Image (cartoon, rainbow, N blue to C red):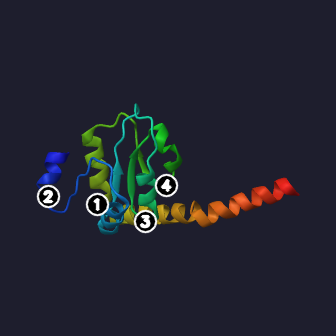
Amino acid sequence: VAAEAAGDPRMLFLQRFLTDDEIRTVYSAADFATFFYQSNILSTSGAARYALTYGLPTITTDVPMLEDLRGSSLVLKASASVGELADAIRMIVECPCMMASLSAIAEHEARRTSWAETGKAHARIYQEVLS
């Protein structure tokens, strides 16, 4: 994948942690985001969640660390091949309606799980407990 990305000036293949400033720059310019994690990774991905806040159509693998993104991204099986990832990317790039649909879902999910909405939910719970 990195070799293919290197040959295309429109593609940016990053395989490292990004600073907050880099994330803002990259996501503001991106058409979509992919998170091709393997199932043996025991971590979380704030970067994947953050991609949704930019309304980016997002492709993820079905791994435990990304299970909260099911329904808000195009999910590939955890054992997906690089070819299957390429097919998924091709599908969103070549189908404007798919890209628009995934973008709308991402924006909805970002609003639904925003800090403001999370705070309101916590306040409701605290009020219920204290009542």
Q: Secondary structure at mark 2?
A: loop
Q: Amino acid at mark 2?
A: Asp
**Nearer-N-terminus badge (4/1):** 4
Instruction: Tell whether 83 sits left or right of 102.
Output: left
Residue reaching furthest to the top: 40
Rendered image: mark on residue 8: 2
**Nearer-N-terminus badge (2/4):** 2
Q: How crowded is the residue under tag 2: few (<14 C-alpha within 10 Å), some, or many (20+)? A: few
Q: Secondary structure at mark 1?
A: helix
Q: Nearer the viewer, residue 13 or 57?
A: 13
Residue reaching furthest to the left: 7
Q: Which residue is mark 1?
A: 93
CA gap between label 2 and label 4 equals 28 Å
**Residues marked 3 and 4 touching at CB (< 8 Å):** no
Residue 29: percent from left, percent from top: 29, 68
Q: Residue at x 85, y 56 (%)?
A: 130
CA gap between label 4 and label 1 equals 17 Å
Q: Which residue is mark 4?
A: 72
**Nearer-N-terminus badge (3/4):** 3
